[in-house]
């Protein structure tokens, strides 16, 4: 008889993410992964600023809020202070790829033994949908109202590819496009935590996620945009797997 | 046979589960939940208990439990 | 057992002996010795050291380790100390203990690597945004710095508020005989707020206290006010030197107070009745030292290694208009004894304007 499918115990039902937001899905998968490995009571989540900061109200693990962008550095301190904890960072575009780029890359550079979750939804959500490093060419945002001009502002930022240059354990980019891709995302998150538990080093999962509110789209259409538009620019797949090398 | 439990007050009527359900068993209901969303309802005859809705819902609306 | 130690090394060792087991920082003159010392010493005691890629990252790591209940140390100087402010603000806001050292170099921007006292405003009146104070200690000798390290840790844990120890490059670089305390073990699990994974308990959230911890806004305001009121009542530290019969009282801290003391001794020989109040805590400022002022006291001379005079404002506040206050702001120089005595003469002859 198959097991019951239940809401993870770590998840709080008071979930203030927008309808259709990918954060809720990712939060649920992190909770499932931790509970499946029996480590939810050892987990310390390090988040920062932006819509991603609501993670601490949804995943009820011990949590610390870092300054904007500094979650990987704060996590590096937590990692050393509590060697037995299961430590992970949870960040969005601004946090991981803009203001926090240095901290992201240096945590990878040091091959820190924690799990990094990067939610790429192509905008700065919490502050009202401004352009992010990950915004696509021509995409309209609050600070690119005629569409992003990548000639002036830079190309869509490929953080997973940058992290993959560092001596890390694991890098994968996934998407929340549909049930099949969501299952792959969960496998990637699972692998990223398994690596930490085995002491293999830094595991980074970039997840393409919808922002229906700031994309001005109905949720179902926003999920479709991940498949039709975003995945064309951001290639899915495993970039680094130290086990395979 | 498993039962599909719907926590209707968690639902935000995003429609993703309706889009992903392989049997078109889900639809937005007629009643508004405590947050003002027309929460999802299931046609029990069409539902095959595959668990797809459980896996794709961002708000943990669904559970599949033994009857 | 007394041994000769460099200031920065002694403070680092004092932190280790107080149970500090996490340091992260970045080299900058004149505090690089702290980074260097910790790079090998932390390992010896089973602690963690990271040479961070920047001060910004370093203070963030210190914040993370502090949140887990460890005794932590951060340090910097000048422009590096500016980069610590974001992290200090978050440590304050999360109501965590920590010890941060500012080894002051003189000047604005890149400044110079010579000693100075030009960071008073930043350290005492806040470098980060918001409604807060750090406990601030200003030792005048290496031994005093060593002794204040364990005081700073205890107080910062009691109040759940970071402490800053500020001394200048001279104290950081010079060598003096010190007696170090015994090694003390610190238990990070003693605090009910320390993060370690929830272990079956409800979730702990380390974040801005006014965001999550005080859902009723008035509690947050009251708690903040009460915390600092208690500090101001109980944590003032100072030394009075020859001030009972003094006609002029110098107010000086840190390295300046040492030259001042020597000048006072010489001035007394020449018949000038002068003394000194030496603040040891800069927040809370030792206003109690200024409470009773004798009739023959003619004024206060605030002496600092700054061009504008920064502490002089707090002297004025403490004196509250009862006596004249003179701003002897010496730039990046420490006056020699003759210059001090000239200044005394000028004040007595009415040639200096009070502020």
Image (cartoon, grey):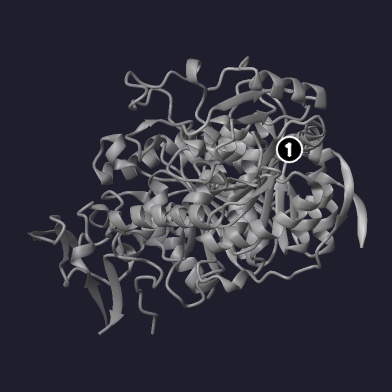
In the rendered view, would you say B55 is above or below C247?
Answer: below
Q: Residue A111's x, y, as percent?
A: 70, 51
Residue drawn at the location 39% of the way across and 70% of the way down:
A8
Residue C43 pos. (x, y %): 82, 59
**SS of the residue at dot 1?**
helix
Residue in the image at 34% along x and 56% along y: C222
Is A218 positioned to the left or the right of C180 in the image?
Answer: left
**Nearer to me, C246 or B21:** C246
Residue at image x 53%, y 54%?
C161
Up/down of B30 relative to A162, above or below: below
From the top left corner, tell me how far across and down residue C286 is, in percent: 57, 46
Specify few, some or many for label 1: CA neighbours under 10 Å numbering under 14, 14-19, or 20 or more: many
Q: Is residue A192 visible?
A: no
Q: Position of residue A207 (x, y in %)?
A: 47, 47
Q: Quadrant of residue C123?
A: top right
Q: Where is mark 1, residue-wise? A: C257
The residue lying toward the viewer, choosing from A75 and B10, is A75
| In the image: residue A158, left or right of residue A52 | right
Lateral position of residue A150 relative to residue C57, left or right: left
Give whichever of A83, C25 is nearer the camera.
Answer: C25
Dividing the picture into quadrants, the one containing residue C350 is top right
- Residue A244 or residue A36, whichever sits in front: A36
């Amino acid at each position: 008889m198959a097991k019951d499918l239940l809401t993870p115990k770590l998840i709080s039902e008071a979930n203030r993410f927008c309808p259709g937001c990918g954060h809720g899905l990712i939060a649920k998968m992190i909770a499932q992964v931790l509970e499946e490995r029996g480590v939810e009571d050892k987990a310390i989540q390090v988040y920062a600023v932006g819509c991603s900061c609501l993670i601490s109200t949804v995943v009820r693990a011990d949590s610390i809020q870092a300054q904007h962008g500094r979650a990987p550095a704060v996590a590096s301190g937590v990692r050393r202070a509590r060697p037995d904890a299961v430590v992970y960072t949870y960040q969005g575009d601004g946090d991981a790829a803009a203001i926090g780029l240095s901290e992201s890359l240096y945590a990878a550079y040091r091959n820190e033994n924690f799990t990094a979750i990067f939610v790429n939804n192509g905008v700065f959500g919490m502050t009202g949908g401004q352009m992010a490093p990950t915004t696509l060419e021509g995409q309209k945002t609050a600070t690119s109202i005629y569409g992003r001009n990548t000639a002036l502002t830079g190309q869509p930022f490929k953080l997973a590819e940058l992290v993959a240059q560092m001596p890390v354990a694991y890098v994968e980019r996934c998407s929340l496009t549909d049930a099949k891709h969501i299952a792959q995302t969960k496998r990637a998150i699972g692998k990223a935590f398994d690596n930490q538990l085995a002491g293999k080093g830094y595991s980074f999962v970039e997840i393409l996620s919808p922002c229906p509110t700031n994309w001005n789209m109905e949720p179902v259409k926003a999920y479709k945009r991940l498949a039709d538009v975003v995945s064309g620019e951001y290639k899915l797949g495993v970039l680094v797997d130290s086990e395979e090398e | 046979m498993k039962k599909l439990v719907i926590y209707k007050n968690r639902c935000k009527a995003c429609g993703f589960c309706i889009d992903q359900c392989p049997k078109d068993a889900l639809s937005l209901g007629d009643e508004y939940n405590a947050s003002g969303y027309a929460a999802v309802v299931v046609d029990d005859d069409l539902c095959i208990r595959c668990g797809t809705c459980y896996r794709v819902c961002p708000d943990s609306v669904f559970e599949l439990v033994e009857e | 057992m007394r041994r000769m130690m460099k200031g920065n090394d002694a403070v680092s060792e004092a932190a280790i002996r107080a149970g500090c087991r996490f340091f992260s920082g970045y080299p900058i003159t004149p505090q690089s010795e702290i980074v260097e010392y910790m790079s090998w010493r932390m390992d010896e005691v089973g602690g963690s050291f990271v040479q961070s890629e920047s001060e910004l990252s370093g203070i963030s790591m210190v914040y993370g380790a502090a949140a887990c209940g460890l005794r932590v140390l951060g340090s910097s100087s000048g422009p590096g100390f500016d980069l610590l402010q974001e992290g200090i603000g978050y440590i304050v806001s999360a109501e965590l203990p920590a010890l941060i050292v500012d080894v002051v170099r003189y000047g604005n921007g890149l400044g110079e690597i010579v000693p100075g006292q030009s960071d008073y405003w930043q350290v005492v009146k806040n470098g980060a945004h918001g409604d807060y104070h750090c406990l601030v200690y200003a030792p005048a000798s290496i031994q005093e710095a060593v002794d204040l390290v364990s005081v700073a840790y205890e107080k910062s844990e009691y109040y759940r508020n970071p402490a800053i120890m500020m001394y200048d490059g001279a104290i950081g670089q010079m060598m003096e005989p010190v007696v170090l305390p015994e090694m003390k073990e610190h238990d990070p699990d003693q605090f009910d707020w320390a993060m370690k994974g929830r272990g079956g308990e409800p979730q702990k959230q380390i974040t801005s206290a006014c965001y999550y911890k005080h859902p009723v806004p008035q509690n947050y305001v009251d708690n903040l006010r009460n915390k600092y009121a208690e500090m101001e009542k109980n944590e003032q530290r100072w030394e009075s030197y020859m001030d009972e019969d003094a006609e002029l009282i110098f107010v000086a801290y840190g390295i300046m107070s040492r030259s001042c003391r020597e000048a006072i001794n010489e001035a007394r020989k020449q018949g000038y009745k002068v003394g000194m109040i030496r603040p040891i805590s800069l927040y809370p400022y030792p206003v109690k030292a200024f409470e009773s002022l004798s009739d023959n006291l003619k004024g206060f001379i605030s002496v600092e290694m700054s061009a504008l005079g920064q502490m002089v404002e707090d002297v004025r506040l403490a004196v509250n208009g009862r006596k004249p206050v003179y701003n002897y702001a010496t730039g990046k120089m420490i006056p020699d004894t003759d210059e001090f005595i000239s200044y005394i003469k000028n004040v007595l002859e009415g040639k200096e304007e009070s502020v």
